[in-house]
Image (cartoon, rainbow, N blue to C red):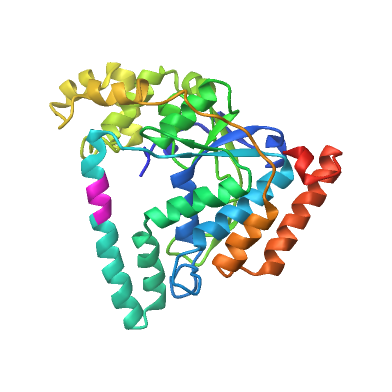
């Protein structure tokens, strides 16, 4: 879900950037966030995801391969951080999301059977979920591509923030703002979905561009501490607690500005939460992360990539080879190297 704080982020704290301006920088991408985007967006007109001849979903592999190739062509060095075991407080949220997806799947099948294609598309996206095959096959593809994978002990966004805080990456990459709450010095959004995109439920399209948010600039603009930004999230609602009914981002900002903390704001409102604010705040300030990771971009196994995508999952050999060739030519031109191996 992610914390809904976009509407209180001042425009002067959001820097519109180009992909090219991020060239040469390592970005710690929230893998689950990216995979959900791919399996949600990359679908047929009837809402079905891409599949191979054995009925296995391949939307995520398509998005992961071609998007990563595009990032590498520009010189961006992506690394993907995978979720581990979620905190105990997130259990209810995980179960609720699962129930919503199951209900959406039923509505999708019903709409499809009745020929309501537009509704079917909507429900199909809501039903999108990750399973073991999607996660493991994505890791295998990244390994063949020579892209680093970091396994988080718990929240992927917390681990990505930690990697960026240590200086092993320039920024976190995610659509959600939780990375900032976890302390990432920079957050890059829209890295996986740049381009023309249809607005949900409408027949309009918008151009999606990358945006960069510096945590310090954001806190200075809002005149808040990181703890107070977390407290705003607590009042609105996080993955660990629902928040206060009827309190949105602007109201939460006003409450924290006035009272200074979530506890004092709740007291003024005469409200309580199911979870103590201090417990939620602790998760964001002291998340379970690990320093036991290795970040190394290796030589790409081009033949292995082609075997996996084309032989195992029925991708067009022509398209895959074209993408690999374009990457090699781009790297030769921009890096002055004579082969793809040398760049890695």
The residue shown at (45%, 51%) is: 136
Tally of numbered discs: 0
Q: In which quarter of the image is residue 12?
A: top right
Left or right relative to 38: residue 71 = right
Asked whether residue 269 appears in the rendered view, the answer is yes
Of all residues shown, which one is farthest toward the bottom?
Answer: 114
Q: Name the chief secondary structure element in magenta.
A: helix
Which corner quadrant of the image does residue 342 belong to? Answer: top right
For the C terminus, the image quarter is: top right
Question: Magenta includes 22?
Answer: no
Q: Which residue is at the front of the view, 330 or 215?
A: 330
Is 254 rendered above or below residue 189? above
Q: Which residue is drawn at 27% across and 46% down?
A: 94
> On the rendered structure, is 5 left or right of 314?
left
**Which residue is at the front of the view, 301 or 328?**
301
Tell me what residue is drawn at x 54 percent, y 58 percent.
61
For the N terminus, the quadrant is top left
On screen, residue 235 versus residue 200, left or right, reads: left
Q: Can residue 192 be seen in this view?
A: no
x, y percent for residue 131: 37, 55
Q: Is residue 97 magenta?
A: yes
Image coordinates of residue 206 in percent, x first then y, are: 57, 56
Depth order, front residue of 79/89 = 79
**Up-down: is 71 above or below 167?**
below
Percent position of residue 160, x then y: 48, 32
The image shows residue 94, relative to residue 158, as above or below, that is below
State which region is magenta: 94-98
């Amino acid at each position: 879900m992610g914390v809904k704080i976009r509407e209180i982020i001042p425009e002067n704290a959001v820097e519109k950037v180009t992909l090219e301006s991020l060239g040469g920088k390592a970005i710690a991408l929230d893998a689950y966030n990216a995979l959900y985007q791919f399996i949600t967006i990359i679908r047929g007109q009837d809402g079905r995801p891409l599949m191979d001849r054995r009925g296995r979903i391949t939307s995520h592999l398509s998005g992961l391969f071609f998007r990563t190739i595009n990032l590498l062509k520009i010189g961006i060095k992506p690394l993907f951080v995978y979720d581990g075991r979620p905190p105990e407080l997130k259990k209810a949220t995980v179960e609720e999301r699962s129930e919503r997806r199951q209900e959406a799947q039923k509505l999708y099948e019903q709409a499809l059977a009745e020929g309501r294609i537009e509704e079917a598309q909507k429900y199909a996206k809501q039903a999108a979920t990750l399973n073991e095959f999607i996660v493991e096959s994505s890791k295998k593809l990244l390994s063949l591509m020579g892209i680093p994978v970091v396994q988080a002990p718990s929240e992927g966004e917390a681990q990505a923030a930690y990697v960026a805080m240590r200086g092993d990456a320039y920024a976190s990459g995610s659509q959600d703002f939780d990375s900032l709450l976890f302390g990432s010095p920079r957050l890059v959004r829209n890295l996986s979905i740049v381009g023309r995109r249809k607005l949900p439920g409408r027949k309009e399209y918008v151009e999606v561009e990358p945006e960069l948010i510096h945590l310090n600039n954001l806190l200075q603009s809002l005149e808040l501490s990181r703890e107070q930004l977390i407290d705003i999230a607590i009042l609105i609602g996080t993955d660990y607690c629902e928040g206060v009914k009827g309190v949105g981002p602007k109201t939460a900002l006003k409450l924290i500005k006035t009272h200074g903390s979530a506890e004092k704001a709740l007291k003024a409102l005469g409200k309580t939460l199911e979870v103590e604010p201090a417990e939620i705040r602790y998760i964001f300030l002291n998340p379970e992360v690990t320093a036991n990771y290795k970040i190394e971009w290796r030589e790409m196994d081009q033949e292995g990539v082609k075997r996996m995508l084309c032989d195992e999952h029925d991708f067009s050999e022509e398209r895959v080879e074209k993408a690999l060739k374009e990457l090699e030519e781009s790297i030769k031109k921009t890096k002055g190297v004579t082969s793809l191996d040398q760049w890695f």
